[in-house]
Amino acid sequence: MGSTPTRPFHPPSDPQWQALHSEPALEPELDIIDAHHHLFDRPQWPYRLEDLLGDFGQGHSVRASVYVQCGEHYLAEGPPQLRPVGETRFVDEAARRSLHASEGAVHACAAIVAFADLGLGAAVDEVLEAHLQAAPTRFRGIRHGLSTDPDPAYARSGPRPRPGLMADPAFREGFGRLAPHGLSFDAWLYHPQIPELVELARAFPDTTIVLDHVGGPLGLGGYAGRRDEVFAQWRDSIATLARCPNVVVKLGGLGMRLTGFGFEEAESPPDSATLAAAWKPWIETCIEAFGVERAMFESNFPVDGCSSGYGVLWNAFKRITAGASADEKAALYRLTACQVYRI
């Protein structure tokens, strides 16, 4: 299906492009915990703590955030399985700097989701314990990427998860070590893989699983022009997954290029009403399936920054939830993230 993409899989966000459209914050008094973002220290795509705090300052009341692994600042030496602990150390220091910079008003990276190779089986205990030692008050879980699809449009450089990983005995043995350490699992996959996650969730009912980015609906390559078909398949899978009480969902990630909405192709960014109209069916379906107590909003910045600025993105979410009650909004924007990540 499809053809190999000529554009970057995740095109870097461009602050100058984002600045071509800005909006005053809607409901600026609504407290937010941004349940998913990254920090990049990459020459071609820097997004450092200062950039994150600058985005927090766009008028929305962002009080804290959750950092999710992206392969930054791994240790340069030592046993390969322990090198991801460098990312946890780096982010824990950023969290301390955030509290100092804001005099405690904003706690960026209040919770940390890191990487450990669950394919190590029971031997992953050593890695989990090292993460806990590196950030004892902030380390909350593991994300081991699962996203893979045979469509050439989703080919990308570097190692990719192999198909069927969630059923692999060694992976499951490692996965089984999370709950004894009090850790959750962030699942980043594509929508055709959701049925595999259902089986994993049923096999480990005591492990909290967080579905990232509404389950990664695809829209490129062979999936292009088939949005209604993709939505129907995705919706059915979401309904089945939501029946697993140990699974929660993150509402966001729809600004990524891989979803096929194409906002990154425009000369100027869309406004929040345009984003809300495009994303509403996906987000409302998740809220209806999981309930507000098992759903939380995320920015996925800077990756979703290829579709809009940070403030505009949160305005889009607030437009989608305009009819929700105060209690429902408190859960979606703050309380679910607080509970899942113990913030």
Image (cartoon, rainbow, N blue to C red):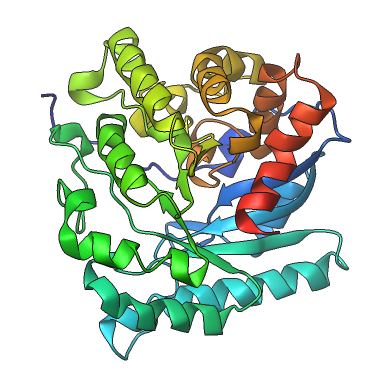
Q: Nearer the viewer, residue 52 or 95?
A: 95
The reply to whether residue 189 is visible in this rendering is no
Q: Quadrant of the C terminus?
A: bottom right
- Say if 95 sits above or below 184 in the image: below
- Say if 227 sits above or below 172 in the image: above
Q: Residue furthest top?
A: 228
In which quadrant of the rendered view does residue 198 lie? top left
**Image check: 116 left or right of 267?**
left
Q: Nearer the viewer, residue 70 or 4?
A: 70
Q: Residue drawn 47% across and 23% down?
A: 263
Q: Quadrant of the N terminus?
A: top left
Q: Nearer the viewer, residue 33 or 47?
A: 33
**Image check: 255 left or right of 202?**
right
- How far across and how far down the image is residue 205, in percent? 41, 49
Q: Residue furthest bottom?
A: 78
- Say if 35 sits above or below 251 in the image: below
Q: Residue drawn 56% across and 19% down?
A: 288
User: In this figure, what is the number of numbered marks?
Assistant: 0
Q: Residue drawn 28% across and 10% down?
A: 229
The reply to whether residue 186 is visible in this rendering is yes
- How far across and how far down the image is residue 134, in percent? 54, 82
**Image check: 285 left or right of 334?**
left
In which quadrant of the rendered view does residue 117 lie? bottom left
Q: Residue drawn 67% across and 29% down?
A: 312
**Image check: 119 left or right of 111?**
left
- How far across and how far down the image is residue 174, in percent? 29, 67
- How far across and how far down the image is residue 260, in percent? 35, 23
